[in-house]
Amino acid sequence: MRVLITGGAGFIGSHLCEHLLGHGAEVICMDNLMTGSLDNVAPLFGKAGFRFVHYNVSNFIWVDGALDCLMHFASPASPVDYLKYPIQTLKVGSLGTLNALGLAKAKNAVFLLASTSEVYGDPHVSPQPEDYWGNVNPVGPRGVYDEAKRFAEAITMAYHRYHGMQVRIARIFNTYGPRMRENDGRAIPNFIVQALQGLPLTVYGDGSQTRSFCFVADLVEGIYKLMTSPVNEPVNLGNPAEMTIRQLADAVLRIVGSRSQIEFRPLPEDDPKIRRPDIAKAHRLLHWQPQTSLDEGLERTVEFFRRRLTAD
Ligand code: UDP
């Protein structure tokens, strides 16, 4: 199997590259390194079947030879990143997806889109099933990511309906694990780095907003199962164990063994109040569900950040 992964040097992309190589696939990893990093794929250089291409997929893409699958993971994905790069986020979700679909069509490859729970916006339904259409502010600061991904889903389904292409849409909920950037801005890396450095943990709002966090190894297994399934429609992938952000902060303090204080900061605009995946569809169609507990996943992630901070 020969697979192209856009955004392959990113957090999830790099775990996917590794997972696919482990399944004997040949992997072409394409990334412009805007939010991804060569450090994430450094251990893969020199492995048989791995190739890195430095490229921005918002421009026309081509690779030589056959492709069995194209997995489109390129995009800023942390709210801090997509607020910093709003136009690039819109471009990679729209033009990047169009280019990737065009290449997949030319190669007769299965196309897998990394979509997001952000398509549900600030949801009025919980947990969120795939047939919930969402509550998104198109012109708010998060709209650049949410609408880009909603457009990406729409054009992916159009290629399926009008060209008969094989497509997969993974709606990825909050994911964490080794290789997140320490300055990525998301709750888990922020809290872990703050706890390790003895700094206050910055909880936005009153911390009563909820999220459901999935360990990256579980997610990657779900993506692999989706890719190798025949399911041409969106599937939620995430861990349904929902908690408040305040509870998350307490869990990080406990696992790190830190006595850092909690410091409350203003809630970002349009920050969703609740988020929890309904994974009945993934369970039914892919026989998938997450296996890693929050404590185990946090321990592995804390270990990664400990090493990274001492290496700096
Ligand atoms: N958050 C927080 N402190 C931080 C970073 C994030 O309280 O230092 C909150 C954020 O406001 C949101 C939740 O944690 O309610 C998850 O944020 P994250 O950026 O990790 O992901 P999101 O689900 O918003 O994309």
Image (spheres, helix red, strand yellow):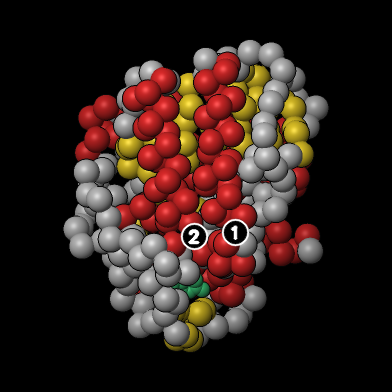
Residue drawn at x 39%, y 48% is 150
How packed mark 1 is, by other alpha carbons closer than 10 Å (few <14, some 14-19, many 20 or more), is few
Q: Where in the figure is residue 120, as x and y percent of width and height?
A: 31, 55
Residue annotated with mark 2:
144
Check disc 1 and report its element: helix, strand or loop: helix
How packed mark 2 is, by other alpha carbons closer than 10 Å (few <14, some 14-19, many 20 or more), is many
Residue 147 location, quadrant: bottom left
Q: Which mark is residue 47?
A: none
Q: Amino acid at mark 1?
A: Ile
Ligand 1 visible in quadrant = bottom left
**Residue 225 can be seen in this image:** no
Residue drawn at x 47%, y 31% is 112
Q: Where in the figure is residue 172, as x and y percent of width and height?
A: 41, 46
Does the Cβ of the disc 2 residue fall within 8 Å of ligand 1?
no
Q: Quadrant of the C terminus?
A: bottom right
Residue drawn at x 38%, y 31% is 158
Above or below residue 264? Residue 149 is above
Q: Amino acid at mark 2?
A: Val
Above or below residue 284? Residue 311 is below
Residues at badges 2 and 1 in contact (C-beta under 8 Å)? yes
Residue drawn at x 30%, y 64% is 122
Give the left or right position of residue 37, taking residue 69 as reference. right
142 and 99: which is toward the camera: 99
Residue annotated with mark 1:
87
Q: Where in the figure is residue 49, as x and y percent of width and height?
A: 71, 20
**Who comes first in sequence, dot 2 or dot 1?**
1
**Residue 119 can be seen in this image:** yes
The total of numbered circles placed on residues is 2
